[in-house]
Image (tube, grey):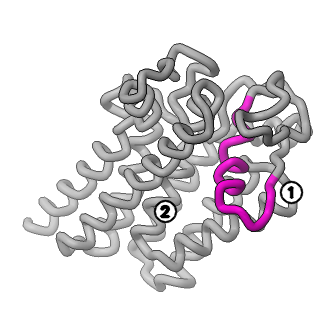
Amino acid sequence: MASIFLFILVVTIGYLSGSICSAVIVSRVFALPDPRSEGSQNPGATNVLRLAGKKYAALVLVTDVLKGFLPVILAKLLGAGPASQGFTCLAAVLGHMYPVFFGFRGGKGVATALGALLGLNFIMGIVVIATWLLVANFYRYSSLASIVAITFAPLYSLLIMRVLDVFPPLLFITFLILYKHRENINRLIDGDEPKIKLKRHELSDVTDAILTPEQNPDDLSSTDGTSVEQSAELKKDSD
């Protein structure tokens, strides 16, 4: 009974943490335009980048990572088992995608998923991030890098953690993120997905690369001068 209560507790905390819409809160705190009604009307880091600049967008991005990371760490501290930790990851990502506090309108969950994976197993999280960077470096598509990295996460959990209990929730996360990226997948197939310009050796440039693909193709550059290599009509933001 205690384990069931703990499972419900940590999963609920994970979902509520994920439901905290960083973009809206940061915009309110710093008196920025509301990202739900301005720009692309998507409450995400990239729309904040477009509306207010890199500094505020980076703050949103870091917060999105933390709201996946912290609930999983809390689940560990409370003594939750691997399955409960895995479903806490899933709950945080679900909260980001469908936030109860903000009309169930959220993002695509990649940053929150990365934070949750770092909390679940730090080495596995680093490997997933390294996969993102590797794919982005060679193919210059942020969406493709996100899809590949998250798709490999369940396999990495088997190889690194060697615990089968975390595999099902991580697989659900993969399916959810693939679903959220369905329009990006169509653009990749059609050759219409915009590329990114990923500079090496600077962490700030990695952040820019993650954020840049959501820029409107009509914008010739982001706020810090990072160019988009391919112009295309984007209907949705790419988290």
Q: Residue at x 28, y 43 (%)?
A: 16
The type of residue carrying mark 1 is Tyr
Residue 188 picture location, percent across and down? 84, 42
Q: Residue 1 in magenta?
A: no
Q: Which residue is the site of mark 1? A: 139
Name the residue at the top extreme.
37
Q: Which residue is the site of mark 2? A: 170
Q: CA distance from mark 1 to mark 2?
A: 25 Å
Q: Earlier in the sequence, mark 1 or mark 2?
A: 1
The type of residue carrying mark 2 is Leu
**How busy is the neighbourhood of tag 1: few (under 14 within 10 Å), some, or many (20 plus)?**
few
Element under disc 2:
helix
Residue 148 picture location, percent across and down? 70, 60
* In the depicted structure, whether residue 200 falls above or below residue 27: below
The stretch of residues the image draws in magenta is 198-215
Specify whether 147 is left or right of 71.
right
Specify whether 4 is left or right of 146.
left
